[in-house]
Each structure stands twice: as structure tokens, then as C-alpha cells.
Image (spheres, grey):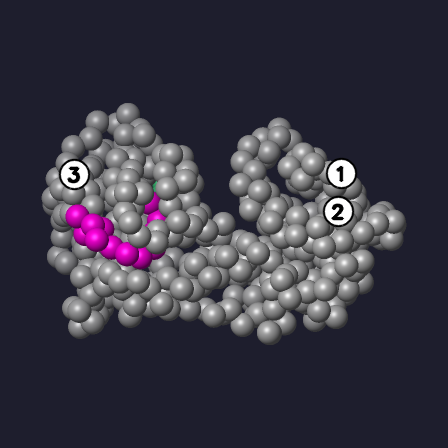
Amino acid sequence: MLRKKTVDQLQVKGKKVLVRCDFNVPLKDGVITDDNRITAALPTIQKLIDEGAKVILCSHMGKPKGEVKPELSLAPVAKRLSELLGKEVVFAKDDTVVGENAKTAADNMQDGDVILLENTRFRKEETKNEENFSKELASLAEIFVNDAFGTSHRAHCSTVGVAAFVKESAVGYLMQKELEFLGNAVENPVRPFVAVLGGSKVSDKINVINRLLEKVDTLIIGGGMAYTFAVAQGGHVGNSLLEEDKVEYAKEMIAKAKEKGVKLLLPVDTVITQEFKNDSPAKTVPTGEIPDGWMGLDIGEATRKLFTEALQGAKTVIWNGPMGVFEFENFAAGTKAVAEAMANLDATTIIGGGDSAAAVNQLGYGARMTHISTGGGASLEFLEGKELPGVAAVQDL
Ligand code: AMP
């Protein structure tokens, strides 16, 4: 149960509401190439418009590191938002984010109007959560709504600091949905509960592996991180990704799975090649028998079958991290097999953002998952059991 105030509990008519969104969308030559993050923010914005609030939106974009970088301006987002909402979203262009221009735009708002501030990271204080910029942001509005799940694991002015200087704060619908899906999956899963972890590094997912072993019935590990586990089992992995300083940890996790009665599945075969490129000739070998000069870039066919079978009958599945270098078409089969198996399940299927979300969408399975998280780093920290600062800062119910 989420114990935070939500937009449904606010009286917003005629009030100025500052909404922190995650509009950190990919841009190419000033054109937005994927507007998923913008569409994900619409329910909260539309609700506030319908209730007659004066809606002031803010977000970061990229990493301008406290400098004004025109190519990271949020102007294209205001334009796209106007199209999606079917009403004008005034872009409050202001290099200092909350300067005279932004203040005038906010002062001139009517009920139901929407404005968008400039990239919050044009201010160097933003990522340091410094009080002066938090206060400036708060001075624009009476209410703060945090709907930026993707940055909720960061304590910045626009995600955390600002909440202390407004009268009221709440989480938005997107944040609420993310927390409910991820929270229910981990705390209250319909079983069998299976987690699939992949991606490049064990070190990024140490705490997640440890915590999930307390919760799941089956843990499937693939991708680059699996080679550290293969070495922990006495295997040889050639030139594959390996974190030698994590081999001991992998051994501990294998022992912990046994102790907890969790089925831990690791790749049994691997597609290997000699060069890190798509058209480099490949063959399949047992995972622990990769010759020197060769590296594993995908799980093999027997592993795909093993993982697919392990997913049958699952009622809750969480997936974070691709099974191989899915960006290369010739090494995407393992990631595709897991995506397809999940898409075909009668289960709650959750994709933990980042690369796995990109992979699932790229491979065309996005619409068949229950929930695709908009935050890679944030969903990982949530799965680790950490409190997200951007959520903690919001008023309790
Ligand atoms: P992460 O950000 O840790 O979730 O890792 C995602 C990245 O892991 C993707 O870019 C994949 O290409 C990469 N990856 C997955 N499997 C392998 C592998 N076997 N070797 C090298 N990179 C991999």
C-alpha cells in the first residue's frame, strides 16, 4: 500500500501546481525520436487541467552539468506536449529556469493553463539539491506533484528539495502506477514468482540479486553477468565479460539460493564469437567451456529452451537486463526468446526499465507486457528495497 498523498487527494482548482515530470526523451537534430516518457506523463497533466489547476511543468533533459546548452532545451517537448494535449503549452524559456520570464509566464496563467519551464539541469544547484534553487522552484506554486519516477532515485532540487518549501505535495499517477506494480510484485506476488536478470555487470545488480533471492521462487540469470557465475562454478569463460572480484559473491549467491530453496538457473550454453561485432562468425559451446580468444555474446539454444520452460506457469515475472548483446541482431535471439516467453504468459509481467524496456519495445513485445517501467535505475533501487528519495520527500497520507 502506497502511504503517500496522490493527485486524487488534492484540491487544485485555481491553484498553481508544479509538476516534476521525466521528459528526458531522446532527441536527434532537435526532433524527439521516442515520446513514450511524454505520453506516460499525460494522465496527471490532463487530470490537473480538468480540475482547473494552473499547471507548471518541469523536467531535466540530458546532462548539461549546470550550463545552458541550447541543444538540451525543453522547447521541443513543449511543442510535442501541445500536440498531444490539444492545447497550447507555453514554453517559459528562461536560462535560469525560474527567472523573470518564467515568473511572468506563471503570473499570467488562467485556470487550466499549462506552462513548461526550461531544463532544470541548466542550474548547477539542481543535482546538488541546494536550497536556493529548491526555494525558487517552490516560489512558483502552492502544490508540488512528483511524477518523475525515472529520477526518483536522485535527490535533486526538483525531485526532493522543492517539496519542503511548498504547502502540499503528492505523487502523480505515473509514479503511483510504477510504485504499485513494482511494490505489489515484490511484496505480494502471485506465485510462482520468477525474476530474470541480465545485462552486463554483476556489480550493478548485487543488492538486487541478494534481495530477490529472499522473495522469488525462481531466479534466472543470463547476459554478461552470467559469466562471473560460470567462473564461480569452476567454468572457463575465455574473453567474455568477467568481474573477478565478484566471483566470491557469485558463489555466496549460489549457496544462498540453495539454502532458501530458490531455483537458480544459469546458462548452460553460450553463443560465442571472436570479435565484438554483429557479423563476426559465431558458434555455440557449453557455458563453462569458452576458449581463450572467444567471448560469449548471447545465451545458446539449450539455455533459451531451459529459461522458456522455467517461465511456464509463472504468475509474476520481473525482468531486468538483456540476455545478450541484443543491439546486434545476430546476438538478440536469447533476449527475444525471454521476451516472447513472457509475452505469452498468463501472468503479471513487469519490465524493469532501461535496456530491457528498450529491448522489449525494439523486438515488438511491448504491448504484451503488463507494465514497462519508465525508470531503469529507479526500478533497480526500488527492487533493492531502498527508499527512493523522490518518493520519501512527498507528504505522507
Ligand atoms: P545493463 O545496463 O547492465 O543492464 O546492461 C545492458 C547491456 O548489457 C546491453 O547493452 C547489452 O549489450 C549488454 N550485454 C548483455 N549481455 C552481454 C554479453 N554477453 N557480453 C557483453 N555485453 C552484454
Region in magenta = 309-324
Report helix, strand or loop for mark 1. loop
Which residue is label 1 attached to? 88
Residue for point 77% across, 64% down:
142
- Residue, disc 2: 114
Q: Nearer the viewer, mark 1 or mark 3?
A: 1
> Within the magenta stretch, is there residue 320?
yes
Q: Kindly identify the amino acid type of the residue bearing the numbered disc 3.
A: Glu
Separation of marks 1 and 3 at Cα, in angstroms: 52 Å
User: In the rendered image, which residue does mark 3 sit on?
Assistant: 301
Ligand 1 is within 8 Å of the C-beta of the residue at disc 1:
no
Crowding at label 1, few (<14), some or many (≥20) Cα neighbours within 10 Å?
Answer: some
Outermost residue, front direction?
50
Where residue 150 sits: x, y (%)?
53, 53
Residue type at numbered disc 1: Glu
Label 3 – label 2 distance at C-alpha: 52 Å
Q: Is residue 14 left or right of residue 350?
A: right
Asked if ligand 1 lies within 8 A of label 3, the reply is no
Q: In the image, ligand 1 is in what quadrant?
A: top left
